[in-house]
Amino acid sequence: MRHVRRLLLIAALLYTFGFELESVHGTPPTTHVFTGSVSSGPSPSGPSSQTYPIAVEADDLLNVTLDYGGTIGCGITLLEIEIDGTTYPIPYAGFLFSGTTHYTAQATATGNLLIIVRIGCAHSPTPSGNTMNYTLTVGINIATPPPNNPFATEEEAGLWRVATMPVVIYTPTFAAVHDGNLFIEIWALNENAIWQPALYITKAELTALPEFPSENVLIARVDTISVYKLTTGEYQVNVGPLGDGKVHVVIFEGIPPAHTYRYTFYATP
């Protein structure tokens, strides 16, 4: 019965707020756009990088989008972005690559928050290296929500909204986990554009998984939705490929998540 009540509550929230729940409620965002290029030759001396200091105040929320494309001439390549000291790999495949990745970070102190884009080449059989052209868009919001924060209703029901993409991903809140709840719940739109539960991973299924699997483990798959436990101990949700060829990826650490990041890429035909 409790699960049924939660489903009804989620349905009401999705109907009432739609995708707006993902937006940050506060002042209008301040947006910075940087267009650049980094190149790295076949020498293993180290990667090339470009650093962008972003002026922030404590508790500011950064929404970072990286549009990138380039060429690879090395046998082993490094593509990554570092945001406030945390490094994330930028996905690529083949000698010509392109994509869009999305990240979020919350400033813990007032000052300059550093974003670094890197490209590297460990070795190459020919004197060719790597070049990445990119546009880096950084939106800054004040993260403090107003008193009528619509997230509050979900949190009171023990639901932590991990991400809103083509689907909505939930885990229990810290309080709900403390009470013994553990799950991953995903909602999606059906063919009639009506929200409905698409996938539910139980506590028993999650606790049966190793903390750090020796290889990435597929936990569940329904239609275009796949959920994995990664060797890093993180969880990954893939949605796609969709009709436009895109695959949306969300990776989160812990339940509820201590950190979440996402990216989007086009599936190879």
Image (tube, rainbow, N blue to C red):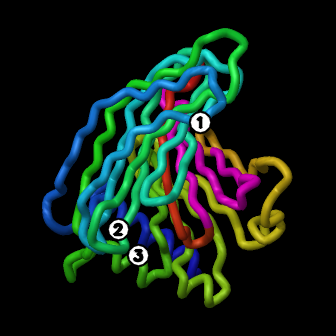
The type of residue carrying mark 1 is Gly
What number is the disc on residue 154? 3
Mark nearer the N terminus (2 vs 3): 2
**Is the residue 82 above or below the residue 134 in the image?**
below
**Is the residue 174 above or below the residue 195 in the image?**
below
What number is the disc on residue 57? none
**Label 2, residues with CA under 10 Å away: few <14, some 14-19, many ≥20:** many
Residue at x 65%, y 57% (from the top left corner): 235
Residue farthest left in this picture: 28
**Is the residue 237 above or below the residue 10 in the image?**
above
> In the image shown, does 258 or 235 lie closer to the viewer?
258
> In the image shown, does 205 or 268 lie closer to the viewer?
268
Q: Kindly check if marks 3 and 1 are in contact, taking CB atoms under 8 A apart as contact.
A: no
* Residue 191 placement: quadrant: top left
Work out how far the residue at label 2 is from the one at label 3, CA to CA, in angstroms. 24 Å
Q: Where residue 16 sits: x, y (%)? A: 28, 63
User: Dot 2 corresponds to which residue?
Assistant: 107
Span colored in magenta: 226-253
Question: Predominant secondary structure in magenta?
Answer: strand
What number is the disc on residue 46? 1
* Residue 120 placement: quadrant: top right
Work out how far the residue at label 1 is from the one at label 2, CA to CA, in angstroms. 28 Å
Q: Kindly check if marks 2 and 3 are in contact, taking CB atoms under 8 A apart as contact.
A: no
Q: Tell me if residue 119 can be seen.
A: yes
Q: Quadrant of the N terminus?
A: bottom right
Mark nearer the N terminus (1 vs 2): 1
Kindly report which numbered mark, 2 or 3, lies closer to the viewer in this rendering.
Answer: 2
**Label 3, residues with CA under 10 Å away: few <14, some 14-19, many ≥20:** some
> In the image shown, does 36 or 175 lie closer to the viewer?
36
The type of residue carrying mark 3 is Glu
Q: Secondary structure at mark 3?
A: helix
Q: Is residue 194 left or right of residue 201?
A: left
